Each structure stands twice: as C-alpha cells, then as structure tokens.
Image (cartoon, rainbow, N blue to C red):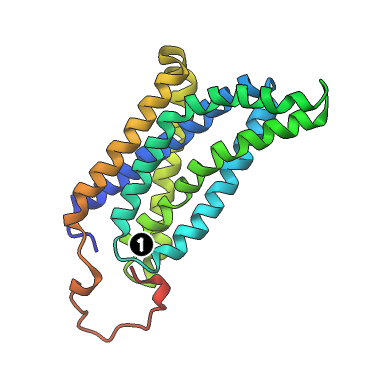
Amino acid sequence: MITGTWSKKALYFLFFLSGICGLVYEVLWARYLGLFIGNTTYAHAIVLASFMLGLALGNLFFGKMADRTANHLTCYAWLEIGLGLYAIITPNIFLWQQPVFSALGKIAPIGSPFLQILKLALSFPVILLPAFLMGGTLPLIAKIFIREIGNVKNEVAKLYAFNSFGAVVGSLSSAFFLIPKFGLDFSVSIAAITNIVIGITAIALRSTIMPATQVAAPSHKPAIIPSEFVA
C-alpha cells in the first residue's frame, strides 16, 4: 500500500520516464541494426519482433513472480537499473557483431540466405533481453497499486497510460532531438542513466510502501479476493 499521495504521483512519473526510455531505445537500436544489417526494413522488423516477444515473455515471467514476492518495488527498481546497465554496453555489443559475423559468414557464399539468417540470429537476442526486462516492469509496479480486485482495471489503465505517453515522448524526442544533437552512442547513455536514476529513486521510495500485513483491516466484511490479486 502506498502511504502518501506524493509517493503515488512519483511512481506514476517514474513509469512515465520508463516509457520514454523504452521507445528511445527502440528507435536507437533500430538505427544500430540498420547499420549492421544494411537494410532498415529488416532492422525495424527485427527490433519490433524482438520487442514484442520480450515484452510478452517479461510480462509472463515477472507477472508470476509478482504473486510470490512482497518486495515489488525493489524488484521493479532492479529491473530498471539492470536495463540501464545493459543499455550502456549495447553500442559495444552492436560493434562486436561485425567481426563475429565476418568470421562465421566465411562459410557461406555472398548472397546466401544463410548470411541473413546469421544476422538475424546475432541481432535478435541483443534486443530480446532488455525487452524482457521492460516487460516485467508493469506487473511489478501494478502490484504496488492494486489492493483489491475492484481497482485492477483503474490502476493498470493509469499505469499503462502514463507509460504510453512516455513512449510517445521518447519516440519523438529520440528522432527529432537526441539523435541530431547528441548522436547514437551518447543518446543511449542518456536513456541508460535515466533508467538507473529511476531505479535508485524507486529504492528510495521503499519506505513509503506499507507491507500488506500492516494494512488495517476494513470495518466491514471483505469480499473474498483470489490470492493472485493480492500484493
């Protein structure tokens, strides 16, 4: 349970910033992959497919984990920090792909479909891992807000809206401001540092979250709530 209105607003704002970072990464990584693959259409397709798969797997995995842990805010914070730390090294990962591809691609002739498959195999996991971490943020932070089955739709809708608004800002700012002004590498660093700050701030807010065992019981007889909806 969140013990202060300002804390609730702070978490909404953190999730808004998280949405900005997510779409900044998506735009930037598509540019990196375009340089590696040599085809922007393939690059955007790989980024989109790996993002969607990673988000789905992250939602599934961390959604189940959220039912088994009481430290939702701590887990959320470390997801954000881990995402930021990984993002910082992604320019180097994309740089290392080229020599690996050159070494493995020698076994196939120029124009062979194997070369495109190899590029896909090298690129897909690079985006899948951070997307997996992003997918875990919503179920974990939602657990902090959801105290009864009746407010599930309301709180999840608010969180998703803040995150989506952030995604809009991130998409536009990366294309029209960050890349032209700072370039790819420094833009990634800005988003990564933002993720790390989000995580550190979330850890600092832990004292405002009251464990479920400390929540006062209601005066009326409560409805029976399935355990999967209890934080």
Q: Residue 99 appears at what percent x and percent y?
A: 61, 22
Residue 123 quadrant = top right
Q: Relative to 52, does residue 117 appear above or below in the rendering?
A: above
- Residue at the (56%, 23%) spot, across then down: 32
Point out the image quarter for the N terminus. bottom left
- Residue at the (22%, 79%) spot, across then down: 218
Judged from the image, the secondary structure of the residue bearing numbered disc 1 is helix
Residue 169 visible from this viewpoint: no
Q: Residue 115 appears at what percent x and percent y?
A: 75, 28
Q: Residue 231 appears at what percent x and percent y?
A: 33, 68
Left or right of 49? Residue 108 is right
Q: Residue furthest top?
A: 181
Residue 216 visible from this viewpoint: yes
What amino acid type is highlighted by mark number 1?
Answer: Lys
Give the camera-side residue of 192 and 111.
111
Left or right of 118? Residue 159 is left
